[in-house]
Amino acid sequence: MADLLLREYRQVRNKITKRTFSYRRISNVYTIVLFEKSTSEFHEFPNKYIHKFRQMSDTGLKINLLQEYVFVPLDIFKENHQNRGIEERLSGWLTFLSSDKPEDIIALIKKYPDFKGMYEQIYEICQNIEQVMGMFSKELYELDRNTVRYMIDELQEENKRYKEENRHCKEQNEHFREENKRLNVALQEALEKLKEQKK
């Protein structure tokens, strides 16, 4: 889940200059969790098959944490849509994700012909296990690459901060030197006056 947020961060960071970058430009990331067989908690809501969650504070403090979750128990969807047909695009997608019955596939393609290409692609992938393994390898590679990029960005930001702190310390050091010189001159003048007064 954190990788999704990291990807969004990288996309925004790459599109704009570092001077105009702000975390406010990062869009919310939605994690959709599909349950083929849902747990008992979901069955307490037998007529609901889309549950939306977002993180909250126990104190009432409101901060957009950029990550929201949608839980979809596909088994409850199937129970609710038995013999009802595909009513709208959402139920088409959920049918696509939850059913491998030939009659459901035919009904879905009749209602939304663009799903045919997706079924053909799934069929081709299932014929080639190496391609499936390649997909997983590519995702793991992308995950590792994104993590490294994020760490480099963080180190660059930290380096920039240290340089700024170093510059600030040098300025303060120079100020203290000047102040020290001024105090030494004033001290010398005061000592000279004391010597003259003793004479």
Image: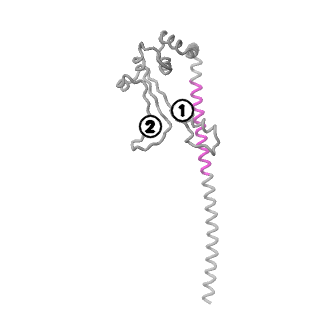
**Residue 196, horizontal then vertical, whole percent:** 63, 87
Q: Is residue 123 magenta?
A: no
Q: In this view of the protein, which residue sits in the foreground, 102 or 172?
A: 102
Q: In this view of the protein, which residue sits in the foreground, 165 or 99?
A: 99
Residue, far front: 87
Q: How is the image coloured?
A: one colour
Q: Which mark is residue 116?
A: none
What's the residue at 47%, 16% (across, down)?
A: 86
Picture quadrant of residue 62: top left
What's the residue at 40%, 18% (across, down)?
A: 80
What's the residue at 47%, 42% (across, down)?
A: 63
Task: State the extent of the magenta-drawn residues as a range.
Answer: 136-162
Q: Which mark is residue 4?
A: 1
Left or right: where does residue 192 sit relative to residue 32?
A: right
Quick one: SS at disc 1? helix
Q: Which residue is mark 2?
A: 55
The disc, 1 or 2, on the residue closer to the chain's N-terminal end is: 1
Pointer 2 local density, CA inside 10 Å: few below 14, some 14–19, many at least 20: few
Determine the CA span between mark 1 and mark 2. Answer: 16 Å
